[in-house]
Image (cartoon, grey):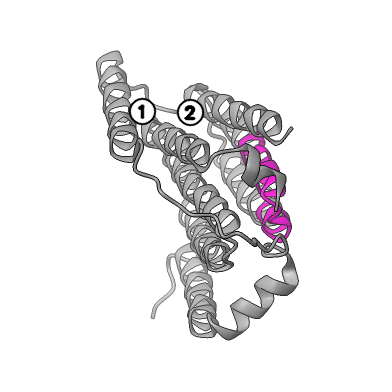
Amino acid sequence: MSLTVFSILGLASVIFALLMVLTKNPVRSVIFLILTFFSIAGQYVLLNAQFLAVVHIIVYAGAVMVLFLFVLMLLNLNAEAEPRQTDRWKLGAAIAAGMLLVTFVGALRGGIQITVPAETNPQVGLVQNLGKVLFTDFVVPFEIAGILFLAAMVGAVLLAKRDVKI
Amino acid sequence: MLDVIKSVPIEYYVWLSSLLFCIGVFGVLIRRNAIVVLMCIELMLNAVNLLLAAFSTYLSDAQGQIMVFFIMVVAAAEAAWGWAFWS
């Protein structure tokens, strides 16, 4: 049962990712990327990482992709606006990515040895457990992430108002 | 024990994530629109996120999922920066 769900979701994410890369229209790319993100969220639900699945949908499908759509529609980018790569470049890119995949497979095949603990805790991905770990073991990285967000916010405002004098 | 741990080997997640990551690399190489290149980078980040979450569940260790949150923070900050830069 889990294997079937995993296969369907994995196939969907790979197909949508390929469509997103290969389609000419940037707006369609965004739509296909959202579909890829939804199938990855399905994988998180399958892994019982429910809080992660919800956050993934809120952050990616809700915020990041809407921002990308905004930019694309604001700048009125379409298929004609994108400069085309030559076919030779595309072939080279396909070969390079394929070689990377071959490297991954060759390096990782048969080398993954994990011992699943005899008593796994199925509650590990729920919000109670994650909150405990985040606010005890990972307090300092959490605060640093807050500072990173503040920097990103200030930087975004500065970039948007280009004529500002510091 | 979760059904997924018994019926799906961890290798399958490794292969799926590798494939998604390579599709992202391919997209970065063939697209020339900067925003689409950023989207392909998001796809690569997501491939890594999926693998971290899978290992976290299989080893029933919450630290992997916390790491996914920090990657999401970086991705969101990157999107905010990109939006400001191109608009």
- Residues at marks 2 and 1, CA–CA distance in whole angstroms: 8 Å
Quadrant of the snapshot with the C terminus of chain A: bottom left
User: Which residue matches tag 2?
Assistant: A21
Residue B34 located left or right of residue B75? left
Q: Main secondary structure of the magenta part?
A: helix
* Amino acid type indicated by mark 2: Val
Q: Residue furthest front?
A: A118
Which residue is located at x 60 percent, y 77 percent? A134
Which residue is painted at 48% across and 28% down in the image?
A: A21
Left or right of A164 on screen, residue A32: right
Q: Secondary structure at mark 2?
A: helix
**Residue B80 picture location, percent across and down:** 54, 60
Identify the chain of the residue marked 1, using the numbered disc in the image: B
Tell me the magenta residue range: A34-56
What is the chain identity of the residue bearing mark 2? Answer: A
Up-down: is A142 above or below A156? below
| Secondary element at image label 1 | helix
Asked whether B29 or B44 is in front, the reply is B44
Place of residue A16 in the rendered image (x, y in percent of width and height, measured from the top left): 59, 28
Above or below for B43 versus A152: above
